[in-house]
Image (spheres, rainbow, N blue to C red):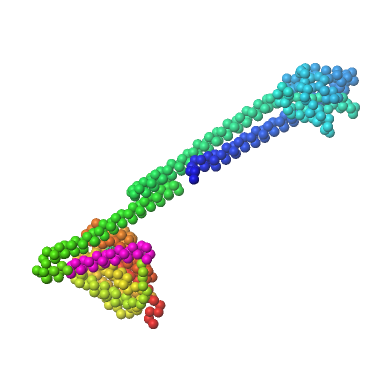
Amino acid sequence: MRRKSITGRWLVNGVGVIILVLVGLVVAGTMALRYVYYESVSAALYEYADTTSGTFSVYLSDSSYDWTTASREFLANFRDRSQVEVQVLDADGNVQMTSTGFVPDANLRADWDAATSSNDGYGLWNGRYSSGERVMSLVTLIRQDDAVPGGLRVVVSLRLVDRQILVISGILIALAMLILFFVMLSSSYFVSSIINPVKEIGRGARTIATGNYRHRIPKRDNDEIGDLCDTINYMAGEIGKAEELKNDFISSISHELRTPLTAIKGWSETLSQIGDSNPDLTKRGLQVIADETDRLSDLVEELLDFSRLQGGRLAVRSERFDVIAELEETVLLYRPRAERENIRLYYVETEDIPPLMGDKDRIRQVFINIMDNAVKYASEGASIRVEAARVGGTVQIVISDTGIGISEEDLQHIKEKFYRVNKNGSIPGSGIGLALADEVVRLHGGRLEIDSTLGKGTAVTVTLPIPTDADK
Ligand code: ADP
């Protein structure tokens, strides 16, 4: 498709229309001007013809003059010959005498014909002499005793009037050009104020597209284009953050994989060296290898779950299960580790909890993820408290710790995938535990909420709905 430019569109749609309007205005203005001028000339001509024919009639009424002598006398005393020409016409409309004395234009008969066919005895004509000069003429029929012995023709040149009209329309054209010039000037400024930033945005967006997410498009004005800059910058920032999170994720996952792999490799080498000589050490080594393999497969499982979650393929069974049993199992699972790490683990037993509907394995995974974090981020000597309660139509499970806590700013992102507070820190993690837990709870129609104060501790509340027929 042919590329269209904004400037081209502006020239056609904006400037083109303005030029058309201006040309129309100038043409209409000139025509109106001409009409007004010619009207006033003809009005003056009628008035003048009336006085002139009046004067001529006075000569004619003198009984001692016949038509020819009266005409001669009248023309001899005519004063305005420099401005107008007066001709005396005979009964057939032919010129008998003129005030200039020159041979009149033979073509001029239209006004006479008009005068004879009209009721009032006037005939106006407006045209060119054969010399090319534009004139206006008015014939007045002279009546004497009900007969028409001839007429008078008054002729004025329109040269001056035409020149005047030309000058004024010249001024109109100049004015139109001036207007056009200012319109072009102001709108070319306007168009370039759009085109230049758009070009700049295009360049900026291309730079961002090459992976330079730190690049920011400078915002010039606080208008729609400025908003666009803001949006693109925001987008670049968000993509950059996502990219960073992904990179962090890859590095922490690599780290997660490396630790068990190192242990497995180390122990397998040790075992192959010692042979059967030390059964106790062999047993311990095999145990470590088994544990680390479990850790690896857990991690792989978590990653698989996560990719299923991303693809919307996370399957959740729906069957009746005892949520308290899953919670207790999680507590049991973590008790030895808590003791080892000198963390007090309290479990508040509850009875009045009905069975829930859902996937018990996934719910246990949620508890494990939360508990794992509580232990992982607990400081030495901290305590963890696990309790469940029935609140209205829901079961609330709260796992709280007096660990390191989370800052308010991090708390907003904590449930996002790959998000980790202490990215390069010593504590291993992938940043997907909470994201996964949140999604699983959501799929069960529940909520996962996190309350935390930096340095004080964290409380994670899982709220799950009790099915309406649970107590039956
Ligand atoms: P990770 O695998 O890093 O633990 P999670 O999604 O489970 O990923 O948790 C995300 C981040 O939330 C963790 O990196 C940690 O900084 C913070 N976090 C989660 N639980 C706690 C807690 N109980 N105390 C302090 N920080 C926590």
Coordinates of residue 86 in the picture (x, y in percent): 78, 22
In screen coordinates, is 406 left or right of 357?
left
Coordinates of residue 400 in the picture (x, y in percent): 27, 69
State the residue at coordinates (18%, 69%).
287
Coordinates of residue 245 in the picture (x, y in percent): 31, 56
Considering only vertical position in the picture, is 226 above or below 449? Answer: above
**Closest to the observer, 441 or 136:** 441
In screen coordinates, is 163 left or right of 188?
right
**Is residue 13 at all visible to an observer of this figure?**
yes
Decide whether residue 310 is among the magenta residues: yes
Decide whether residue 471 is among the magenta residues: no
In screen coordinates, is 412 left or right of 274?
right
Of the 4 image quadrants, the one containing the C terminus is bottom left
State the residue at coordinates (57%, 37%).
19
Q: Most extreme residue toward the left, as rendered?
A: 277
The stretch in magenta equals: 287-313
State the residue at coordinates (40%, 77%).
468
**Is residue 402 at all visible to an observer of this figure?**
no
The quarter holding residue 146 reads top right
